[in-house]
Image (tube, rainbow, N blue to C red):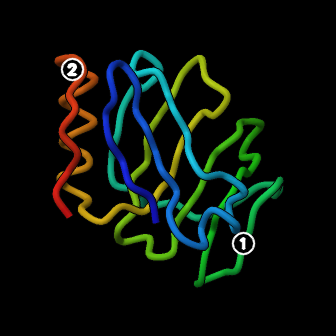
Amino acid sequence: MTEVKISGNKLVISVVGWDKIWSLKSRLEIPLEHVTGVHPAHEHVRGIRAPGTYIPGVITAGTFHVDGDKVFWDVHDPANAISVDLQHDRYAQLIIEVADLAATIRLIEEAIHSGPSATPPKA
């Protein structure tokens, strides 16, 4: 799972618990101007695995190459996953599990449309 917050002009994704080991990441900081959209994720891993973990039905965590793009995943339960679309960044997309889907989407949308906020979603 991840924790999402806005810090200044950045989207900050903190990978929590054992997922740090499975994904080989503990934190991602993405400039808000690189975020082009956010929505519930209804996708499945496809492509070539790079550093990370993929156990079907259990966890998808790490960096994956999908259609020539790098995509970061950290998902156990796809029903709680969001997709963050990016441009001009190392990753083309982040697919991450969050505690509160609607609140996290709202937080990111507000940040990219109206500027930075420091308020994280309530769990």
Residue at 38% x, 54% y: name it. Answer: 3
- The residue beneath circle 1 is 54
- Residue 38 at x, y percent in the picture: 34, 40
Against 38, residue 116 (above or below) is above
Q: Of the residues shown, which amino acid type is indicated by label 1?
A: Tyr
- Residue 52 at x, y percent in the picture: 76, 61
Residue at 61% x, 75% y: name it. Answer: 59
Mark 1–mark 2 Cα distance, whole angstroms, equals: 34 Å
Q: Find numbered disc 1 in the image and state the secondary structure of the residue it sits on.
A: strand
Residue at 24% x, 26% y: name it. Answer: 111
Q: Please report whichever mark, 1 or 2, sits nearer to the chain's N-terminal start.
A: 1
Instruction: Farthest residue to the bottom: give it.
Output: 57
Tell me the quarter of the image containing the C terminus. bottom left
Q: Residues within 10 Å of mark 1 (few under 14, many from 20)?
A: some
Q: Of the residues shown, which amino acid type is indicated by label 2?
A: His
Against 71, residue 3 (above or below) is below
| Horizontal relation, residue 112 to residue 75: left or right | left
Quadrant hosting residue 28: top right
Residue at 81% x, 55% y: name it. Answer: 51
Against 114, residue 93 (above or below) is below
Against 65, residue 114 (above or below) is above
Quadrant hosting residue 120: top left
- Residue 97 at x, y percent in the picture: 43, 62
Quadrant hosting residue 5: top left
- The residue beneath circle 2 is 113
Q: Find numbered disc 2 in the image and state the secondary structure of the residue it sits on.
A: helix
Q: Residues within 10 Å of mark 2 (few under 14, many from 20)?
A: few
| Horizontal relation, residue 44 to residue 48: left or right | left
Q: Nearer the viewer, residue 21 or 31?
A: 21
Q: Are marks 1 and 2 in contact (CB under 8 Å)?
A: no
Figure label count: 2
Marking on residue 44: none
